[in-house]
Amino acid sequence: MTLRVEPFTKGELARIHGATVRILEGTGIRILEPEAAKLLEAAGASWDPSARIAKIPEPVLKELLMRAPSRFKLYGREPKRVLSFGEGNVYMSTMGTAVQVEDPDGSVRPASLKDVENFYRLSDALPCMDHSSWVVWPRDVPDSLVHIYEVLYGFKYNAKSIDGYNWGRQYSQDTIDMAAIVAGGVEELMRRPLLLGFTNPVSPLTLAKETTEGLLVFARHGQPCIMPPECMAGGTAPSTLAGVLVQQNAEVLASIAVAQAARKGAPVFYGSVSTIMDMRIGAVALGAPEAGLLSLGAAQLARYYGIPSRGTGGNTEALTSDYQAGAESATTLLLAALAGFDFIYDSAGGLESSLTASYAKLLLDSDVCGGVQRTVSGIDVSDDTLAIEVIEAVGLKGAYLSHPHTLSHFKSEHFQPATFHRGGRTSREKSDRVLKDRAQARCDRILKDHRVEPLDETIEARLHEFLKKAMKRPAVPATPIPAA
């Protein structure tokens, strides 16, 4: 049994689809990458080069969407690390590309390369984290080399699947080439994808040049790619949530169409990071309840098209790991999980609209992730779990604590948080920092004791050689891709 919430009837889904088709056929989508426009035009879309607008008729859209696979896998460098998308699983990942870090004393500083290493090692150790994202964007190395350091450290300090980079052809190809070193060649990488890409549309209704270039590179190399608009209701999209879903749907479907025009069967996710703009201050509100509602709608639309989905949860606008952070993070994560997303990004570690990463919050959020995963797994009803014979045997005056049935089931039936407090208060526990202190202490223990499965020495040497060669290239500006 898996719990799932679906807000729309079949008729309502059809209305959203119809509105989306009307936008794509009439208003169209702006495409700033020439090759992507040519691919769509060759597939049957109309193209206005002066306005750089493509209009996609419904039959063309339908044909391209049918090429997208309904199932695919993503692998870690360790053989047992496999994520199977489109099979009803709900996977979770750490937050992505924060530019600053909250230290244990509450101070905030720029992210560093040491933080990259630490967060990869923590993610590798935490069982609720299924995928290891680029938690931080380090500020102590050139931007033009960050993507290479991230992939190098991702493979060295973590055995789970990792992110790639979709910013322009060169940088995207760099991450493909590095992953091919680890995989044993390009063909093997295409057979067992190691990288997860992100190609964020620019709302409203625009596919940017650099991210679309990255999409083409990843699609042609068979690496899964996510198209996650971050529409802000009332700012970059209609203020109504249904209107957001229509615009977002157009942006996602156009991106998927480009990927399928580039390579039939390219693995893609229907993505969403959309939420509202706080109209009082003009800022994004990733922790808003509307973000959760939009997650419910987006995941259902993804199933409508038969495409695996990626959502976001665990977000907050809070500045530290306080009551607001816990409430917003837990609410958005639970709704994203109940939505039935295959993959949930930003599940752990984020503060301040994902601008800041927190070690303590990563550990606290890991407990939230475990609780949410247990919730959506539902209640198993079988002869064994109904426990009729156990109840009869214990009777009216017995106890279940020592019964074999309890011993054989409690670990799978009951979620046990590693950091959250249970039990009574002691005289020493009088500060509201007790929980954060406990989380930080656990974080420190993991960083001291956890050992990552070592990367093959020859492969690591080749990755370092790749980095040395990249250092000699002329610097080209890079930018963190918002992965909220």
Image (tube, rainbow, N blue to C red):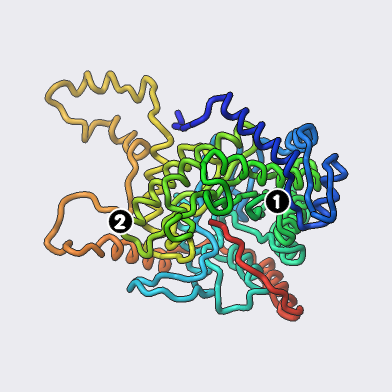
Q: Secondary structure at mark 2?
A: helix
> Residue 152: x, y in percent?
63, 67
The part of the image, by quadrant, that contains residue 404 is top left
Q: Is residue 235 above or below residue 451?
A: above
> Residue 139: x, y in percent?
55, 76
- Categorize mark 2 by other alpha carbons within 10 Å: few (<14), some (14-19), many (20+): few
Give the total number of marks visible in the rendering: 2
> Residue 455: x, y in percent?
61, 64
> Residue 391: x, y in percent?
23, 22
- Kind of residue at disc 1: Gln
Q: Residue at x 78, y 40 (%)?
A: 56
Q: Is residue 434 above or below residue 272?
A: below
In the image, 280: left or right of 192?
A: left
In the image, 121: left or right of 455?
A: left
Check the picture and name the quadrant holding the N terminus: top left
Q: Which residue is mark 1?
A: 223
Q: Residue at x 12, y 25 (%)?
A: 397
Of mark 2 and mark 1, the one earlier in the sequence is 1
State which mark lies toward you, 2 or 1.
2
Q: Which mark is residue 323?
A: 2
In the image, 257: left or right of 200?
A: right
Q: Residue at x 15, y 64 (%)?
A: 428
Q: Is residue 356 above or below residue 71?
A: below
- Kind of residue at disc 2: Tyr
Q: CA distance from mark 2 to mark 1?
A: 39 Å
